[in-house]
Amino acid sequence: MRSLLTILLLVLGCAAPMAAPIVGPWEPKFKGVELSIGTNLTASGEFRNRQVVYALRVDLKDPDVKLFTTPRHTNYLANSREVGGLTVSEFVKKYQVQAAINANFFSPPTYYLPAGTAMDIKGLSMSTGVVVSAQQTSVESATIAFDSNNVPNVIFTNWPAVARDGFYNAVTGDQPLVIGGVNVATTSDVEPRTAFGISEDKRYLFLLAVDGRQSSYSAGATFRELAAWMLLLGAHDAIAMDGGGSTTLVMQNSTGTAVRVNKPSSVADSGRERTIGSHLGIYAKPVPGFVHEIVAIPEDTYATISWRTLKPASSEVLFGPTTDLGQSSGVFTNLDSFHQVTLGSLHPSTEYFYEVISRVGEETHRSPLLRFMTTNYVTTNELISLTNSWRFTAEPQESSAWTREGFDDTVWGEGNGLLWIDRRMTWPSEVEPKGTELPGDPANDGGPHVTYYFRAPLTLHLMKASSSLVFRGRFDDGAAIYLNGELIYQVRMPEEPFTSSTVATGFPCEGDATCDEEFRFALESLQSALVGENTLAVEVHNYHGQSPDVTFGLAVYRVVAAERPRLEVSYSPSGVELRWNNPGMRLQSAANLPGDWSDVAGVTGTTVTIEPTSAARFFRLRR
């Protein structure tokens, strides 16, 4: 019996311990800014709920790190019109900060308001030395203030309000979480949470977003759990900020686009970020790497990309009009520390994405995904405006006949874009111009049908070999576009075939048709029978049966690349004759190539004769 008991004790001693929270590694995102993702999947100690957390560690001693909080409204009025509300993504885009998170509480607590809506901030808020909101009560009075050198000062109860001398940026939250390395938080409900903290040596600022209200992914946290996370991250002092559906952490990607890092409950519920009144942003420089000092110099149909590497290496550029890239400059195997590659056969006035690659032996070094825009040596003509007239119907069109020429659409309705239906009480003011209202579905209490169909003629003339068609539309939510019966583009739609009950796979912007979506086709990629009368057909699909709105508008432009400027030189008895082919260009001259260029006086046309001189002169054309 003793032997059996010993074996049983050994087995029990090998039982797995209860799982503990996991703090992910700190990953550099910008110089002085690192991201960690943490999880707690089972109950353990202080942590009783399923959680996914996202934390930034900001080096306040990095000379290139600058903080920026929401500035005053243009028509500032204290305690009423203090700031213009923005989503966190809008804040990143507007002020071009590299990262941002929600901060103070605010009013009105109405969400999804238009950008710029006047709001009042709760608690002390300062932006670059200017008081945006003064501390007025003992409620929501836990403040973190920074001087102009980013030195922090945590004021756990800023009431009566302390003197603001030396404060440059300041934000205020709910209550203290951690004081002197001790968890002092009170009990609370489980919610999405935001918290800010400072390390003991005051070098690091911690910004924490805990996702919640998504039980199978992340339930949220109590204040006690929030404080425990801050201690795990390394905070010595910490305060709770506004949370709930406002909890949103956003960073720029390498192309400068604002990207949500966490999964806000507001987006999970509605597909949209909340419009909030207070944000804390961070300016920071890129993380230096083997590949650095990347410069793109675009022209109309070509671009020159240059960069440097820490060691001599090969050169290659991958590029393309989408983030999938798909084209290569080819690999240049000459090893050098300075690299310069020219990309040709580009389209004018077009955005391109690219990354540079340099190899040393078996090592491959890549840049982040970057982008440039080619110049606009083109002429553009509007063929269909965003407010164009369209035939429309919500009757199911289960065959493709409706997309082709000759289809009888005379029984369809007719109206001008933006064509729309919205059963919400208020029409979003940023969705403009508002055109014809579409019919509702009686089976959906007057709300939108899942699918609407649109047709319009498209007249094309003078389509030269250098021509392309640019389509710029508003599609809420998904759409398929046809030209003479051929599907040429689809956005947020599943694989064909489409039916009247097919729902879109996503939604635009923050859930409303507030942003243009553009795509283009070179002439050679479209069918040859485009010249003359054509038929443009579009079907627009809602995201799901209970989505309250559908919006559609589409503009079409013909873009023709202009002939490249050309300067010709010939000699005559009276001097040197210069001729050029574009009257929109100016002739300039200089004594040397890098020298000071100036317009040649007295030039009224596209020909000029220059008297010979003993000194060399250089000439160029400039738009």
Image (spheres, grey):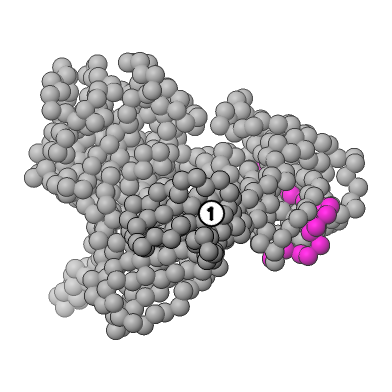
Residue found farthest to the front: 573
> What range of the chain is rendered magenta?
525-546
Residue 308: x %, y % from top left: 29, 68
When asked about the image quadrant of residue 152, the answer is top left
When asked about the image quadrant of residue 4, the answer is bottom left
Query: Residue visible at 78% across and 34% down?
Result: 415
352 magenta-colored: no
Name the secondary structure under disc 1. Answer: strand
- Which residue position holds label 1? 608
- Using a 10 Å C-alpha cutoff, classify the residue at mark 1 as few (fewer than 14 neighbours), some (14 to 19) or many (20 or more): some
Residue 433: x %, y % from top left: 64, 32
- The amino acid marked with disc number 1 is Val
Query: Residue visible at 64% across and 48% down?
Result: 380
Query: Residue visible at 14% across and 38% down?
Result: 149
Above or below residue 498? Residue 72 is above
Above or below residue 450? Residue 3 is below
Foreground pick, 612 / 446 = 612
Query: Residue visible at 75% across and 35% down?
Result: 416
Foreground pick, 455 / 307 = 307
Q: Is residue 134 left or right of residue 279?
A: left
Count of numbered marks? 1
532 magenta-colored: yes
Q: Is residue 428 left or right of residue 292?
A: right
The answer to whether any part of residue 360 appears in the image is yes
Quarter of the figure with the N terminus: bottom left
The answer to whether any part of residue 242 appears in the image is no
Foreground pick, 40 / 161 = 161
Residue 545: x %, y % from top left: 67, 43
Residue 102: x %, y % from top left: 34, 36
Q: Is residue 410 left or right of residue 368?
A: right
Above or below residue 218? Residue 163 is above
